[in-house]
Every structure is written in C-alpha cells, then in structure tokens.
Image (spheres, rainbow, N blue to C red):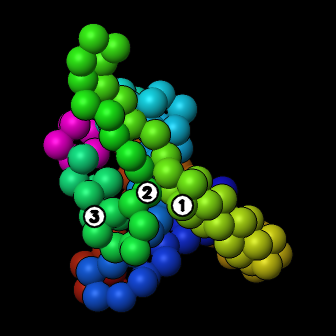
Amino acid sequence: MARLTLRVDLGPDRSIGPGKIRLLEAIRDSGSISEAGRTLGMSYRRAWLLVADMNDCFREPVISTQLGGAKGGGAALTPFGSELVDEYRAIEAEAHAAAAVRLERLQGACRKAVKRGLVRTSRRQGSAP
C-alpha cells in the first residue's frame, strides 16, 4: 500500500516528522520519557535527545518534566506540545486527503509483490540490469 510520509522542514537541521510526533504522543500517553522510548523501541538517551532537539527548535518547550522523588518523576506535553501534535496531524490528514487519488494510481502501477527467496530471475549476459 502506497503511503505518504510527511516531514516538515523548519530550517537547517530543524524538522518535525512522524518519529518525533509519535514520541510526543507516547510521552503524552505514558507520562514518561523513558516509558515512551521503550514503547517506541528507543533508548532513554535517544528519546531525550529528540525532546531536547524539539525544545531547542521552538520558542516554547514541547514537554515539561518533573524530577523523581517520593512520587517519582514524569513528563507531560506543554500546551504548545499538544498544539504541535494536533497541527502536525491536521497537516498530515490534509496532505493524505489531497494525495489519495495519486497514491492509488502509483500503487496500481506497481508490480505485484513477490516473496523473496521463492522466485529467482536470471539475466542473460549482456542484457541491461
């Protein structure tokens, strides 16, 4: 199935895309950077670096953190972080709707998928790859 993946470039070395948005959603849902990272199969360090990158990119932070203690630490999206997720998902939905017919055409032009290892093709010497 053809799909559209959206990344918004905000300047040199500044972008927001599906991975960062999924991380923000996982933080929102779990209340924890480390739990969000585990959910997405990434280390705490990687998750924290992505959050730091987003916080450095925007005028307002995307998450707020609470240090550990008797009740434990945690993380939550700021109002701006929630707005960022909502805006990205809205842009994504509009882009998908606008491209749906063209994606369907591209998908229709694709060869049928062949399971790897089951079908071998041979090329004659001198033929184009």
Is residue 65 found left or right of 113 in the rendered image? left
* Picture residue at 36% right of the left edge, 30% below the top: 74
For the residues marked 3 and 2, what is the alpha-carbon distance in whole angstroms?
A: 10 Å
Q: What's the residue type where badge 3 is placed? A: Asp
Q: Position of residue 66 (x, y in %)?
A: 32, 34
Task: Determine the secondary structure under disc 2.
Answer: loop
Using residue 86 as the reference point, say whether residue 36 is left or right of it. Answer: left
The extreme front residue here reads 70
Q: Which residue has dot 3 on it? A: 53
Q: Which residues lie in the magenta part?
A: 41-47
Placement of the C terminus among the 4 image quadrants = bottom left
Give the residue pinned by disc 1. Answer: 80
Q: Is residue 105 visible?
A: no
Asked if the residues shown at circle 3 and circle 2 are in contact, with their CB atoms under 8 angstroms apart, the answer is no
Give the side of residue 40 with respect to residue 114, left or right: left
Measured Cα–Cα span from mark 2 to mark 1: 6 Å
Question: Which amino acid type corresponds to the residue marked 1 in the rendered image?
Answer: Phe
Which of the two labelled residues, at mark 2 and mark 1, occupies the earlier sequence position?
Answer: 2
Question: At label 2, which amino acid type do we have?
Answer: Val
Badge 2 vs badge 1, beta-carbon distance below 8 Å: yes
Above or below 18: residue 15:
below
Q: Residue at x 27, y 11 (%)?
A: 70
Residue 62 disc label: 2
